[in-house]
Image (cartoon, rainbow, N blue to C red):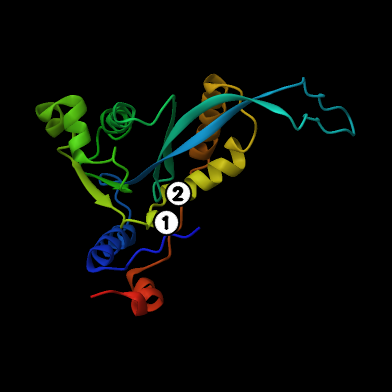
C-alpha cells in the first residue's frame, strides 16, 4: 500500500529546510538531532529453546506467546556519532516530553543551540511540551531548541529512520520477552554504537531533490 502525497510548496519548503540543515558542517555546540520511535512486539518462547552446542546452532520453536508491546525512542546525532535510546511502555505525550527533556538537560546540556528533526506525529509539537510541563517550564526547556519538521508523508527525510532500521536488524529482530530484556539489549547496542562513533553519511541534497522530484512539484 502506498501513500502518494502531493509535492506542494509546503512540502518543498520543509524538504529544503531539512536538506539545508543536513548540508551544514558539523558544529559540536549546535548539534542536529533526529528523533523517532519504534514499537516492538514482545514475545516469549512457548517451549524452552535448545541451547547451542559445538557444531550445532541453538534451536527455537516456531510457536511463541505474545507478551504485549513496548516503545523505543531513538535520538541520533548523525554527524556526531552519538545516539540516545530509551525503552518505554508507551509512546504517549508525557513519555516523549520526558525523553526530549533528558536529551536537553543531560546529554546536550552544554550545547548553545539544538536542532531537532521530527516527523508530524501528534506528540511531537511544542504545544505538547506546554501541555505536560506548563507554558513557563516548556518555554524555559525549549529556549535553545529549533524544530525542523519533515513534510507530511516524507518521514524518509528523518535520519532517525536509518538508525531505527539498523537497530531492527542488529537488536530488535530477536525475540524479546519483556521490557526489562528489551531495555538491556537496547542499552548494550547503544553503548557499542556510541563507542564505535558510528555516523550517518547523508548525501541526498536539494539539487538531487529538484532533479529527481521536480517534475512532480505542484505550484
Q: Marks 1/2: CA distance?
A: 7 Å
Using a 10 Å C-alpha cutoff, classify the residue at mark 1 as few (fewer than 14 neighbours), some (14 to 19) or many (20 or more).
Answer: few
Q: Is residue 114 above or below residue 58?
A: below
Q: Tell me the tag on residue 156.
A: 1
Horizontally, residue 6 falls left or right of residue 62, namely: left
Q: Could you tell me if residue 198 is visible in this image?
A: no
Instruction: Say whether marks 1 and 2 touch (CB < 8 Å).
Output: yes
Q: Residue furthest right?
A: 55
Identify the residue at image location x=52%, y=34%: 40
109 relative to 159 in the view: left or right = left
| Place of residue 169 in the rendered image (x, y in percent of width and height, measured from the top left) | 60, 44
Residue 22: x %, y % from top left: 33, 58
Can you tell which quarter of the image residue 45 is in?
A: top right
Q: Is residue 9 above or below residue 77?
A: below
Report if residue 152 is visible in the image: yes
Q: Residue furthest left?
A: 136
- Circle 2 sits on which residue? 161
Q: Is residue 12 left or right of residue 78?
A: left
**Image label count:** 2
Label 2 sits on a secondary structure element that is helix
Amino acid at each position: 500500500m502506498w501513500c502518494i502525497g502531493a509535492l506542494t510548496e509546503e512540502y518543498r519548503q520543509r524538504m529544503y529546510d531539512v536538506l539545508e540543515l543536513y548540508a551544514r558542517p558539523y558544529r559540536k555546540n549546535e548539534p542536529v538531532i533526529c528523533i523517532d520511535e519504534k514499537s516492538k512486539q514482545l514475545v516469549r518462547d512457548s517451549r524452552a529453546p535448545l541451547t547451542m552446542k559445538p557444531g550445532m546452532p541453538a534451536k527455537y520453536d516456531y510457536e511463541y506467546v505474545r507478551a504485549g508491546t513496548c516503545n523505543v525512542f531513538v535520538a541520533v546525532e548523525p554527524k556526531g556519532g552519538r545516539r540516545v535510546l530509551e525503552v518505554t511502555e508507551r509512546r504517549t505525550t508525557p513519555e516523549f516530553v520526558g525523553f526530549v527533556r533528558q536529551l536537553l538537560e543531560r546529554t546536550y546540556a552544554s550545547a548553545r543551540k539544538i536542532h531537532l528533526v521530527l516527523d508530524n506525529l501528534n506528540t511531537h509539537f511544542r504545544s505538547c511540551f506546554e501541555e505536560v510541563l506548563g507554558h513557563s517550564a516548556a518555554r524555559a526547556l525549549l529556549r535553545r531548541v529549533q524544530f525542523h519538521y519533515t513534510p507530511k508523508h516524507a518521514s524518509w527525510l528523518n535520519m532517525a529512520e536509518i538508525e531505527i532500521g539498523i537497530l531492527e536488524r542488529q537488536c530488535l529482530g530477536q525475540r524479546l520477552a519483556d521490557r526489562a530484556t528489551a531495555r538491556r539489549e537496547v542499552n548494550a547496542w547503544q553503548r557499542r554504537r556510541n563507542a564505535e562513533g558510528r555516523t550517518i553519511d547523508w548525501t541526498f541534497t536539494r539539487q538531487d531533490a529538484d532533479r529527481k522530484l521536480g517534475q512532480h512539484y505542484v505550484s
